[in-house]
Amino acid sequence: MRLDPIAAPSLRRQIGLPALALLATIAVAMMLALIAGANPLATLGLIAKGAVGSKFAALETLNRATPLIFTGLAVAVAFRAKLWNIGAEAQLYAGAIVAVLLGTGVLGAPLVLPVSALAAMLAGALVLLGPVMLKTRLGVDEVVTTLLLNFVMLLFVSYLLEGPMKDPMGMGWPKSAALVKEARLPRIVDGLRLHWGFALALIAAVAVWVIQTRSTLGFEMRAVGQNREAARFAGMPVNVVLVKTALLSGGLAALAGWSEVAGLKGHLSSDLSPGFGYTGIIVAMLALLHPLGVVLSALFVAAIFVGSDSMSRAAGVPTYIADMLLATALLFMVLALMLTRYRVVWK
C-alpha cells in the first residue's frame, strides 16, 4: 500500500470525507451507549436535549464554548505555521493570573477591563516566546518545551494560591481574592452565566481570519507552514514570522484564562481549566485549522460536554463517553483529512 498525493482534491472529496467522519463518530457513540447498557438513540437524544434543549442549556453550551474558541484559535494560528504549540494550558493560566493581579482593585473602572485583557495577552505571549526562542536559536523541539511548561505553570499557580495570592478570607481554600465588580465582564443575559467573553471570542475568530487571509503576516504564516525552506529561500524572515505567530497564539490562549476569571469564576483556582488548552487542539484539528471553523468546532465540542453531563444524570451513562467521542472524532477527522489529500493505492 502506498499514498499518492492528489494535486487538486474535488469539492465532493473535501466535504464528503469529513461528513463521513462525523457519521462514523455518531456510530461509535451509539455503540458506546449500547455497551454501557443504554438505548443508543435515546442517549443521543439526551445529549442533544442537554446541549440545546432549553434556553439555559443553549446558553451553557455557548458559555462552555468561549474558552475553547480562544484556545482553538491559538492552536490553529500556531499549527498553520507548523509551530506546534502544545502549551495553551500554560498560556491560559498566565492570562488568569494577570486578570486577578489587575482585577482586585489595582485599576479604576474605565481602564481595568481593556488593560487587564491586553496585559493578559502579553503574559500569554511571553510564556510562548521562550520555547520559540529556544527553537529558533538552539533548535529545541517546541513540543517538549511547551508541553512541560503546562506542568510548570500549574505548580506555579499552586504556589501562588498557597502563598502570595491566597485569599485571606477564603477559609483556607486555595483560591485567590475575588475580582472587584468593575473588573468583571457583564452578563449577556441577566440571571444566566453567559458573559460578553463569548462575543469577544467571536470577534477574535473574525480578526484571526482577516489576518490569515488579508494580511502579509497571514501569507507569511501559510508560506512558512507549507515549506519553511522555500519561504526562507524566497527571502522571508522565517524566525521573525515564527516569533510573531507565537505572540499571537500565546495571546489568544491567555484570553481564555482571562475570560474565565473575569466573566465566569471571579477568582483564580488551580482547577480553573479542566483541560481547555488540550481540548483546543481537538477543536483546531476538527476545524481543519480554519479560524471561522474553530467557532463551529468549539460549539460542537462544548455541546458534547454539556449534553453528556445532562445525559449522564438522566440515563446513568458515564460522562467519560464525551472524552471517547472527542478522541474518536479527532482520529476520524485526521484520517479524513489525510484521505482528502492522498489516494490509497494497493499493490
Image: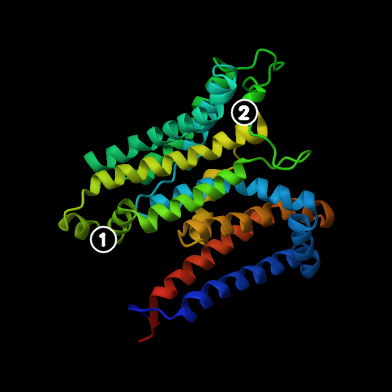
Q: Which residue of the protein is positioned furthest toward the top in this rendering?
A: 168
Residue at the farthest bottom position: 347
Horizontally, is 70 left or right of 86 in the view? right
Looking at the image, residue 192 lies above or below residue 2: above
Measure the C-alpha gap from mark 1 to mark 2: 42 Å
Residue bearing the label numbered 2: 269
- Label 2 secondary element: loop
Q: Is residue 278 visible?
A: no
Among numbered discs 1 and 2, the one appearing first in the sequence: 1
Above or below, 43 against 4 in this view is above
Q: Amino acid at mark 1?
A: Asn
Query: In the rendered image, which quarter is residue 160 located in?
Result: top right
Which of labels 1 and 2 is toward the front? 1
Q: Is residue 39 above or below residue 251?
A: below
| Residue under numbered circle 1 | 227
Q: Residue at x 68, y 66 (%)?
A: 29
The quadrant of the image that shows the C terminus is: bottom left
- Which of 233 and 154 lies nearest the eye of the viewer? 233
Q: Secondary structure at mark 1?
A: loop
Image quadrant assignment for residue 167: top right
Please tell me which residue lies in front, 97 or 279.
97
Quadrant in which the N terminus appears: bottom left
* Viewer can see residue 190: yes
Taking depth in this image into account, of 102 and 182 the one nearest to the observer is 182
Residue 73 pos. (x, y %): 48, 50
